[in-house]
Amino acid sequence: MAKKSIVFVSFDEEYISVIEYKFTCLVEKSASVEFISDKNSFKRLMNIPRKIDILIVPEGTMISHPDAYSKTKIFYLTDNKEDNEQKGYIYKYYSVKSIVEKLGIDLVMDGEGAKGTRVIGVYSVAGGTGKTITSLVLSYKLRKKGKRVLYISTVPQQDFSYYIDSDSSLSSSFSYQCSINMKNALKTIDGEIVNGDFEYLPKFKNLPVSYQISFDTYMQIVTYMKMKNVYDYIIVEMSSDIQQSKLKFMSECDKVIFVTTQDEVAVRQMETLIDSMSDNSAEVLIVCNRAVKMREDYLKSSFLSKHFEVVERIDEYGKPLTYDTVKDSILFKNLISVFE
């Protein structure tokens, strides 16, 4: 079958630079895509009509020679999220995959669907943002949708067990092998995994540092479990400290969920972090917890909300959210919809 031809027009060069690589990777087996950010180049294209299967242009663009493009599917990029519900309109700040899916034809390359284990990183630059609750609820809701999910916490305090009321811990022999011979530890890891609301790697009996467990140790576990291809998703919760191996891991994830609040310090710290991830190829999603409408929202004015999808805003409640009260609620429904 011949490849579809796509022309993607946006005069925002920074926007094109952000989505070009990911968009091309998603459609490369089914379509050829040409990006145009120069107005004169677009004018020449319109003056010399040629066969185009899909044309994506900024909202309000006038199509010259409309008869020549009568068989072309035309989509308009909009800055207004509500316009996305209209036929032929695409909200430009949705995830790249969501934009591709909005085109209405099967363009996503093989392997982007249900095939293969996908690794989802969950990170926050500061504590108290609801990162653990977000990770656990995501794991639970994906499991309820019939997906096989493995949750792994790399947080040194291993406090996730408090939320799911679990006394389970990794065996002494496994913990010891992790510190001296990872190959031997990985041979027995299947017997360590607990199957509850979802499958998860339980906490170490003592603090991981007492077994000389580092973030690199966890990455060996994640890599091994991904290679086994048993799970649909591996959800990896990360601590807030920054190290080069963590940045590298995030850049290699299928998706990275950044959990933040709307306050200035949290947003500025996240801006600095994402700026440092220059080679990032992962799809970035943002969850804003503890949102307060009457308080200044620095996330809305940040470049982050212009270049990455803020998939969820969870309002601040009078008391802290718990896993038990949230897991079967409607909260995080927008985040879950990204995985459908």
Image (tube, helix red, strand yellow):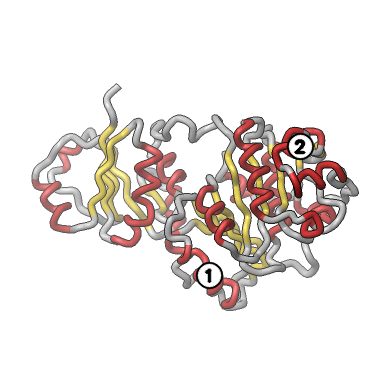
Q: Is residue 250 left or right of residue 234?
A: left
User: Viewer-nearest of labels 2 and 1?
Assistant: 2
Tag 1: amino acid:
Leu
Cα gap from disc 2 to disc 1, whole angstroms: 40 Å
Name the quadrant of the C terminus: top right
In percent of width and height, residue 105 lies at 39, 32
Q: Identify the element where label 1 is drawn.
A: loop
Q: Is residue 324 visible?
A: no
Residue 65, relative to residue 105: is it above or below? below
Q: Identify the element where label 2 is drawn.
A: helix
Q: Quadrant of residue 148?
A: top right
Tag 2: amino acid:
Ile
Q: Which of the two residues, 112 or 77, is positioned nearer the viewer here?
A: 112
Residue at (67%, 53%) from the top-left corner? 237
Mark number displayed over residue 238: none
Task: Check disc 1 and report the residue beneath it.
Answer: 299
Task: Check disc 2 and report the residue beneath it.
Answer: 189
In percent of width and height, residue 220 lies at 64, 44
